[in-house]
Image: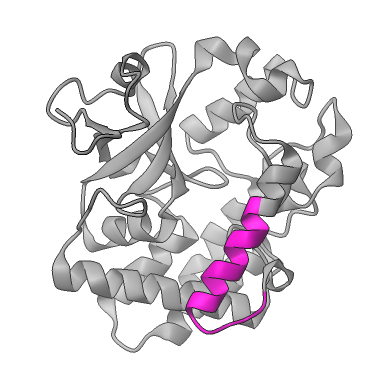
Amino acid sequence: MNVSNEILDLRYQSNHPLSFLYSEIYSSCLLDAEIKHGRSQPGFALDQNSPFVIAARVANNKSNCIQSIQNIFNLYYSYFEPKNAMEFLGFKELKNPVLKNNPPWGSVFPWRYRSIESYQNAYETMALIENKAVGINNGIEDGWLFCGPCTQNKSLVEAKRIAYVVEQIKQFGYLRSDDSDGDVKATALINEKKEWRWLITGGNHRASGASAVGYKTIPIRVNLVIDRNHVSYWPHVLDGTYTIEEALSFFDRIFNAEVSEDIKSWNKNLIHTL
C-alpha cells in the first residue's frame, strides 16, 4: 500500500525495514516503530534518559517551564563536551585520525555515503535554520544540539523547540503527513537476528516529545536500511575512515543504546536539576 508516489506504507504488511530493500520505485517507507527501539545521537534510547526526552517530560508536566527545560540542556552540555568527532562517536582512538581532526558535527557514520565535509556543512546549515526559527540569528558558533559546549542562546533554542513540540502533541495528538517534513525520519539498523532499531536522522524533538507524552509507537519514515552483516561494504569502511571492527563497535553501541561515561555522569546528576 502506497501513501504517496514516493512513500511505501509497510505498517500493515511486514512492518519490517528489510521489505523496503525490495521496493525500488519508492524513496522511503513508513513503519510503526516502538519508542523503546528508537535511538538518538550519540546513542540514547528514546524511552530512557535522553536530554531531549527528559526536557520534554518537564514540558509535559509543567506550564511556563522554559527555564526548567533550559537547565536540563545546560547540565547535559556541561557534562558532555567532546573535543572532536571521534570522541563524540564514543571512541578513545581510531586507526585513521581523520575524525579526530574534525568537530563533533563532522561525525559521519560508517554506513553513510556523505563525506565528512558534507556532513559537517549540512549540520552547520541546519543550525542556522533551527536557531532563526526561534528568533536567534547565530549559527553553529553557539553550539551543536547534540553536545556541549553550547551558549545560553543555544540551550534556550532547544528549550523553546521542545516546549513547542510537546504543546502541539498534547493539543492535537501525534500527527503525520506526506509532506517532506511530515514524519520523523530514521535509518533502520538490522542485526544478525533480523531485529531492528531506528536511528533518528530528522525529527528528534518530535520523537522525544511523543515519548514524553506517553506514546509507545509512532510512524516513522525510513529511507536507509543498514544491515550489520554488510559492514565490509559500508562507504566509510571501504574508504578507510573506519576499520571493520571500529564500525561494528559503533553499530553495536547505537543498537544497544550504550553511551559514554560523561553522559552516564550527567544521568547520575540529573536528579538535582529536576
Q: Residue at x 63, y 52 (%)?
A: 122
Residue 87, position as x, y percentages in the image: 74, 45
Q: How many marks overall?
A: 0
- Horizontal arrangement in the rendering, residue 243 relative to residue 194 (left or right): right
Residue 56, position as x, y percentages in the image: 36, 67
Q: Where, by quadrant of the figure, is residue 52 drawn?
A: bottom left
Residue 155, position as x, y percentages in the image: 57, 75
Q: Residue at x 35, y 49 (%)?
A: 184
Q: Where, by quadrant of the figure, is residue 172 drawn?
A: bottom left
The answer to whether residue 274 is seen in the rendering is no
* The magenta segment: 122-138
Q: Main secondary structure of the magenta part?
A: helix
Q: Where, by quadrant of the figure, is residue 29 drawn?
A: top left
Could you say which is closer to the camera, residue 224 or residue 206?
Answer: 224
217 is higher (above) or lower (below) than 208: above
**Is residue 72 a member of the stretch shown in magenta?**
no
16 is higher (above) or lower (below) than 165: above
Could you say which is closer to the camera, residue 195 or residue 115?
Answer: 115
Which quadrant, please, contains the C terminus?
bottom left
